[in-house]
Amino acid sequence: MRKGRLAKIMAIGMVCSMAFLSACGKKDTVITEGGDRPAKEIDKDHIYSFENVDIPVSGNCSISRVCEGEDSLYAIAYVYSEDSMGSTKLFRMPFDTGMVEEVPLGDGTKNVSADNLTCDDDGNVYVVKYEYDMADSEDAVLYEADAEASSDVGETVSESGYVDAAATTSDEDVENASAGEAVAEDEATGYDAEDVSLDDITKLAKYSSDGTTIWETSLTETDADSYISSITYAKGLGVLTCSELGISLYDEATGEAKTIRTRERNEDGYYSGYLFRMRNDDIYLFEEDEGSGSVVSKLNAGNMTFEDAGFELPEGIYGAYELYPGKTYDFYCEQDSGISAFNMGDTKTTRICDFTASNEVVNMINFIGELEDGKIVMANSSGDECILSTLTKVDPSAIQDKEIITLGTVYIEDSIRKQIVKFNKKSDKYKINVIDYAQLAGEDTSDDDTTDEYMTGINKLSLDITQGKAPDIIVFENDMPFESYANKGALEPLDPYFEADSDIEAADYLSNILDATKVKGSMYAIIPSFNIQTCVVASDNAGGEVITLDNYKDVCARCGIDPEIGMGMVTRDDARELYQTIGSAYVNYEEGTCSFDSESFVKFLEFIKELPEYSEDMDYEEYESYYRENKSLLKGYWLGSFEDYQVLKKGYFGKDIEFNGYPTTKDGKSYIYPSVQIGMSSDCKNKQAVWEFMKSFLTDEYQSNISWNFPIEKKALDALAAKAQEKPYYLDANGKKVEHSSIWSIGGTDVEIAELSKEETQTVVDFIESVTDTESTDDNVINIIAEEAAAFYEGQKTAEEVADIIQSRVSIYLSEQM
């Protein structure tokens, strides 16, 4: 992509659509709209209205478990604030009133928390209960400290939709939270099970609807020695619990317990079990073992054994953690930003509710249930807020017709979905419909291979773009040949929109990022946020020079480093990543040419051939320490925050560092990696409306809320730089800063990450602004390189012969794209 100043284009005049842009303050220029194109109709069949139910809490709140009884809904929530230690509360919502009330746990003399929850048909609830006396004990201090740390965590989610690993307690928490699974008690409440012995304080308890204790009992040995992942009420039998070591039954009347099934602990693998009571009172067990997927069995109440249920989960359902028993259907689940349902034996799910079509953004669903009147009840958590909602289907005939704007994507990110919802709520004339090409691809595939869905989705979207059938708005994946689309005239140049819009000034944004979207001098996309893919080197090893393919071995020799592991754990099997970084430099999409037959590319192939072959015996943690021990030279890294600078400097290297970039024959190259990249079809009908949506990603509101990856707005980037110079902190419930330490474990060494100096943040900013190359992956080119280069690595052809073949094949491919 070519660098260059923003083109100054005078737009010719007509008045913009006042129905949509009356408050936009536009300049006296306008963009000509495209011609008529057929658009999808509004999805009116899956739209629900949402009504939130008030939960009586003071402070921050996070729902962990929910169960549906005969006449009430019960929920366990963790509540925390600045003035008190976090506490677990049980709430009840009678269906006849819809008013949420707290149900007290215990007699108030001890601290009580609860994990796992189930209900019977008589208004009673059963919980796994933790009870301990915290008065005047060291444990109270530990508990309070953990509770404060937990209040920082909440449910921190990044812009791309993933849970922020830096803000959570452990990697396991991240995995569980991102999957929508309720985390274990110590993560959910801030109480660390290792701080206080649980042998005598963990029990199964039965409460009446008003919180009166009916009975409580010690856990079976099976349950006491393993975390209980699931419990359920079995009508006429009692309460069943499932842990890693087996299944136990607790008598409904007395709490008397016995183990009915045992299993060996899997020390090296993951296991979880989920018990479900179905609408006909049958009990099903879904077990997930590492490498085996979900195994479904049914309880035979006659002999208390579990037998093969004879069915598998439908396509697109990857685990029992996302399932909730229903009334009309056997199960409901969150799927594709909405609610789907299925009956046992179904191969596909049925769409029930589309959150985006309903103009709602929903995060972290904890429960989906169905009321007798057909309404859906849903519990979820967003940030520090507990949200309990009832969903009512909207009569399709009552839904207003609007002009449709289509948005094409391959797996839609939450950051984009939120902007769509805001746009649709604001506009009374237009509605954005999402076309997820990964879903379309899934309809054509016979398995659950998400990688195949991803690439098939990209190919479908690319075909529509090149055949003049592109969606109005295109969300580009980095595996899509963006420049090729622009050269074919399929994309709308955006320079005139910047010029015509008085709300947006190009000077307020990083010029190198704006320039990164240019093809032949014109801008064709918006990149709201990004990270930098680069290689880092210790300053003393670099010795004032850039590490290139030409001097790589010499520098390694000077530093006493084996060149084979000079890039750490990068092996020949990782060559694909190098093809899409260094290899992309040999393609010029603007001219439709390539230079793979050059001496430079030959050296690149020789460099890859000398990398070690992958071995299952490789210890990643050991390789992490190689840079600190001066055994490796260059570390590949995705720089997405200012904190990363200290992670590299203090953590990986333990000394001053420099951004070298990936070695090429002349210099080192770093690459802009867009986290989001959005363009407009040149055939789009309502171009001005589409621009209003696109520019929402450039507003102060959007840019100032980017904390994962770097924002494109200079002001927002400066704000992050200023924050990086403060000691790490979180904001409590009252917005007060509470300082804390950020500890990273790298190569078995714990490193405290402190605030950056002004000079360090400026180093990061200067580096960000210096990067001009964009990693725009063309999978077709990468496949050609990978296919042909293998013959050189295996000694069947010379590097020059392979380079000539690659040059010929890629040249033919590029000529077809022009």
Image (cartoon, helix red, strand yellow):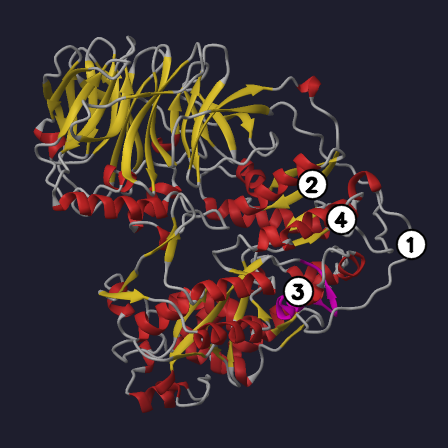
| Cα distance between the residues tagged 1 and 2 | 26 Å
Q: Secondary structure at mark 3?
A: helix
| Of the image marks 3 and 4, the number of the one nearer the N terminus | 4
| Of the image marks 2 and 3, the number of the one nearer the N terminus | 2
Q: Which mark is residue 468?
A: 4
| Image quarter hosting the N terminus | bottom right
Left or right: 754 as drawn, with respect to 531: left
| Cα distance between the residues tagged 1 and 3 | 26 Å
Q: Which mark is residue 13?
A: 1
> Are the residues at dot 2 and dot 3 in contact (C-beta closer than 8 Å)?
no
> Are the residues at dot 1 and dot 4 in contact (C-beta closer than 8 Å)?
no
> Are the residues at dot 1 and dot 2 in contact (C-beta closer than 8 Å)?
no
Q: Quadrant of residue 654?
A: bottom left
Left or right: 818 as drawn, with respect to 749: right
Instruction: Tell me what residue is drawn at x 18 percent, y 12 percent.
Output: 252
How would you rate the neighbour count of disc 4 (Cα within 10 Å): few for under 14, some for 14-19, many for 20 or more? few
